[in-house]
Image (cartoon, grey):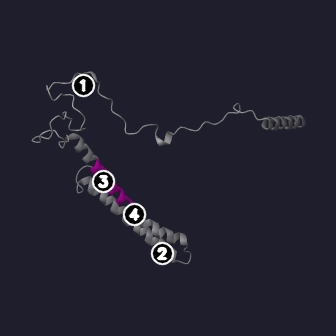
Amino acid sequence: MRGNLFSARGLALLSLCGLCLVGCVLLAWWQWNRFESATGTLQNLGYVLQWPLFGLFPFYMFWRMRRLAAARDAAESAEAEPDQTGPEEPGRPRPAGDPPTTPDTGAESPITAETGAESPAARAAPEPAPRSRRAGPPPWRAPRPRVPSPQDEPDEELAAYNRYLAELHARDAGRAS
């Protein structure tokens, strides 16, 4: 959804949304006529109320796609432009004794204030790996609880019942043959 609202793609999507709205309003009108007829039911009245909502849904989706695209564009442009609001801003003096900081994170800079050279600790430390936004498995792959197996706890009553069922099965098998 990048670009202008009045681009060819934007106008085509708006036209399609308008066509859906007109079609759904016509279907609501038809359901109203069915409701007023002798065979009309409350179900027809329910459809009269639902069809306009179905017709408005494509407009909502168009609006939502435009908002998401604008937010994505804003995030991309914010990543492309470095932040210039820290103490390193040109023309703004740094307070005495403060170590230099990086403009994007505010963390201490690897360049020392006294010599202007890179500190030995900064040279030795590797850059941290980028962290993912989410930790753990996705919600649809949550760990399942462990199902206890029959060997976990022996149950004498259950064992007696299973023996009784096996005996009944053996009797039935003897009669059938």
Mark nearer the N terminus (1 vs 4): 4
Mark nearer the N terminus (4 vs 3): 4
* Mark drawn on residue 67: 3
Q: Could you say where residue 132 lies in the image, as x and y percent from the top left?
A: 37, 36
Mark pair 2, 1: CA separation: 78 Å
* Mark drawn on residue 55: 4
Residue at disc 4, secondary structure:
helix
Q: Amino acid at mark 4?
A: Gly
176 and 50: which one is in front?
Answer: 50
**Label 2 crowd (10 A; few <14 / some 14-19 / many >=20):** some
Q: Could you say where residue 3 lies in the image, as x and y percent from the top left?
A: 23, 51
**Label 3 crowd (10 A; few <14 / some 14-19 / many >=20):** few
**Label 4 crowd (10 A; few <14 / some 14-19 / many >=20):** many
Residue plotted at (25% across, 49% down) = 2
Q: What stretch of residues is rendered in magenta?
A: 54-71
In reply to whether residue 130 is colored magenta, the answer given is no
62 and 134: which one is in front?
Answer: 134
Residue at disc 1, secondary structure:
helix
Q: Is residue 107 left or right of residue 132?
A: left
Q: Are marks 3 and 1 in contact (CB under 8 Å)?
A: no
Residue plotted at (29% across, 56% down) = 12
**What residue is disc 1 on?**
122
* Mark drawn on residue 33: 2
Magenta: main secondary structure equals helix
Q: Amino acid at mark 3?
A: Arg
Residue at disc 2, secondary structure:
helix
Mark pair 4, 3: CA separation: 20 Å
Q: Is residue 30 left or right of residue 112?
A: right
Residue plotted at (36% across, 59% down) = 60
Mark pair 3, 2: CA separation: 38 Å
